Amino acid sequence: MNDPISDMLTRIRNSQMRGKSTVETPASKARARVLDVLADEGYIRGYEAKTGKDGHPAFEISLKYYEGTPVIRELKRVSKPGRRVYMSVGDIPQVRQGLGVSIVSTSKGVMSDANARSQNVGGEVLCTIF
């Protein structure tokens, strides 16, 4: 697998389109950090580490819905393996005039765009959520 973050985001997107309550994805530290930001921002209920069907470590992600519609309306990968996107703190985009969130990988860890601005750090923009 070339892009594990993109794979996880696609699994979340597909599961929400199908109305699933949970989705399973292989575990990794990078995925855990992105899931922490999603949980902190209120886009998912949470996640827990477990052993997958094949015996490898996995995360079971609890998806969040509001009145039957998914909380996540749009989930886009920005920085990809073929084209990395780095931005300084002043260039980090606001998603939908601040209603959405960008997830940024900085030297101080993976965080939301608001946290990156408050800590005055830029980095690689992993994805945007609305």
Image (cartoon, helix red, strand yellow):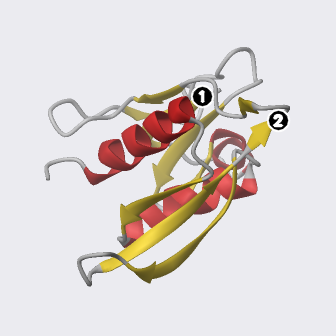
**Quadrant of the snapshot with the C terminus:** top right
Q: Can residue 66 be seen in this view?
A: yes
Q: Say what amino acid the circle numbered 1 marks.
A: Gly
Between residue 126 and residue 60, name the one nearer to us. Answer: 60
Mark 2: amino acid: Tyr
Q: Which residue is drawn at the image coordinates 64% and 40% (left, top)?
A: 113
Residue furthest out toward the top: 97
The front one of 18 and 31 is: 18
Mark 1 is surrounded, within 10 Å at the Cα level, by few (under 14), some (14 to 19) or many (20 or more) other residues, namely: few
Q: Where is residue 17 in the image (x, y as percent from the top left)?
A: 53, 29
For label 1, the residue is 90
Along the line of sight, which residue is nearer the eye, 124 or 38? Answer: 38
Residue 59 location (% of width, % of height): 46, 69
Q: Give the label on residue 66, or none.
A: 2
Give the SS element for disc 2: strand
Hey, which quadrant is residue 46 in on the image?
A: bottom right
Determine which quarter of the picture holds residue 19.
top right
96 over 56 or under it: above or below? above
Residue at the spot x=35%, y=70% of the render? 28
Quick one: 34 or 86, which is closer to the camera? 34
Gap between marks 2 and 1 measured at Cα: 33 Å
Q: Do the residues labelled 2 and 1 touch (CB within 8 Å)?
A: no
Which badge, 2 or 1, comes first in the chain's sequence?
Answer: 2
Q: What element carries label 1?
A: loop
